[in-house]
Image: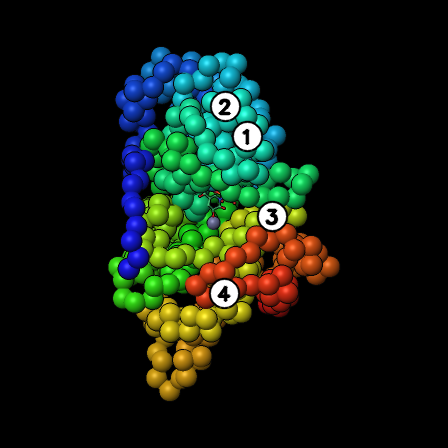
Amino acid sequence: MNGFYFHNPTKVYFGEGVVSKLGKELEAYGKNILMTYGGGSIKKNGIYDKVTDILKGAGKNVFELPGVMPNPRTEKVYEGIKICKEQAIDFILAIGGGSVIDCSKLIAAGARTDRDFWESFLIKKEKASDAVPLGSILTLAGTGSEMDCLAVITKWDAQIKTSWGSPLVQPKFAFLDPTYTYSLPKNQMVNGAVDTLSHLFEQYFSRPDTNNVSDDLAEALMKNVIQNLPLAVKNPEDYNARSNLMWDSTLALNTLVGLGKEQDWITHKIEHSLSAFYDVAHGAGLAVVHPNYMLYTYKGGLSKYVQYAKNVWGISSEGKTEDETALAGIRATRDFFKSVGAPSTLQELGIPESSIDAISENVQRYKTSYSDLTVADVKEILRLCLQS
Ligand code: NZQ
Ligand code: ZN
């Protein structure tokens, strides 16, 4: 196992009704709270009313930034920064999925600098020097943003979707109530679970491949998602299945399973390019790309793919070559995605073949443990995504 540094300071409150602890948790922060949320789901499912009651009861002045869109865009960050500066915001409370939390992280850092957040953080990759503290109430399990320091943002007119991170924007706390995810449309729930699996793949399929506990943890989490997602598809109010999916998603990206590993993340880079051109849901893009990335690169990590097929999918290697076993594991992955209703082709995402060149040229590439893709390779992977 490679050496590593581990520090994850986010406090997690997990379980039904945990939001009752919010008022106490906020005692440590100032009076002016900016509540950020999306397009209205929290008003429909009652979370908005519950939280605003708690904030009022705690004597907070509440300001709001509604309308954070999926695949959040730079305009929304500027809007939030303006509110923070004008209203002397002391704390940002993000209520939603990855989009709301990511947007809030960039607002938090952008509000405490005179620099332009896009130019400074995303283009020049400069560090933040300060940030408004923030916390989250999660309503969609998948991205892991509630317990990591990363933020993904899109500059739509430039067709760039990119990420940035800072320990200063790591959420102070995350409230994880599995019942808050009951109201998710099925496709959003599936997208989140695919994202969880994709995060695990990005870390697991990388060196070192010697026996290590990070990979064992990743396999356990993969199996748990594979077991619980169909249960939640069948019964969206299966508390146990929702609980597992929620905690799986947090554990998949709170850096734990990547410790001591090189990690990959090229599939994420390809997906970000799809979203930058076609605004596709992150998990849906991953469902299409990840099995095909595996198919294209598995020979670079053949023994690991054999291990994956055997340990995660229970595929026997008896009478099979290593290639056949590895391919059976990849097929099982794609079949699983299809079985829960995830898309498997670019056509299903509304992405035409004619856009493959532009999307591929836009992908940020680098050498990983198992791959060293050229633009031509990315094009080939995306062409594989045309076949169901
Ligand atoms: O906007 P509202 O009305 O709230 O509806 C949202 C949105 O339309 C809806 N939703 C969320 N919770 C709901 C609900 N609807 C009903 N009931 C609920 N309980 O779901 C839709 C999608 O939400 P969004 O936040 O966009 O989804 P997700 O959590 O998948 O976030 C995706 C974003 O996170 C980035 C992605 O690239 C994308 O921009 N990522 C962030 C990462 C990170 N910070 O570490 C890592 C990931 O790999 C990912 O790149
Ligand atoms: Zn992801």
- For label 4, the residue is 371
Image coords of residue 319 (percent x, y): 37, 87
- Horizontal side, residue 111 vs residue 386: left or right: left
For residue 301, side relative to residue 363 (left or right):
left
Residue type, label 2: Thr
Residues at marks 4 and 2, CA–CA distance in whole angstroms = 38 Å
Q: Amino acid at mark 4?
A: Ser
* Residue lying farthest to the bottom in this orientation: 319
Q: Give, as a three-letter code, the residue at label 3.
A: Ser
Q: Give the mark nearest the N terminus, 2 or 3.
A: 2
Disc 3 versus disc 4: nearer the observer: 4
Residue 65 higher or lower than 322, as above or below: above
Q: Is mark 3 within 8 Å of ligand 1?
A: yes
Which label belongs to residue 117? Answer: 1
Residue holding disc 3: 275
As measured in the structure, the alpha-carbon distance from the residue carrying label 3 to the one carrying label 4 is 22 Å
Task: Identify which residue is drawn at 55% across, 30% down.
Answer: 117
In percent of width and height, residue 109 lies at 47, 28
Callout 1 crowding tier (Cα within 10 Å): few <14, some 14–19, many ≥20: many
Per the image, label 4 sits on a secondary structure element best described as loop
Q: Nearer the viewer, residue 233 or 345?
A: 345
Q: Quadrant of residue 95?
A: top left
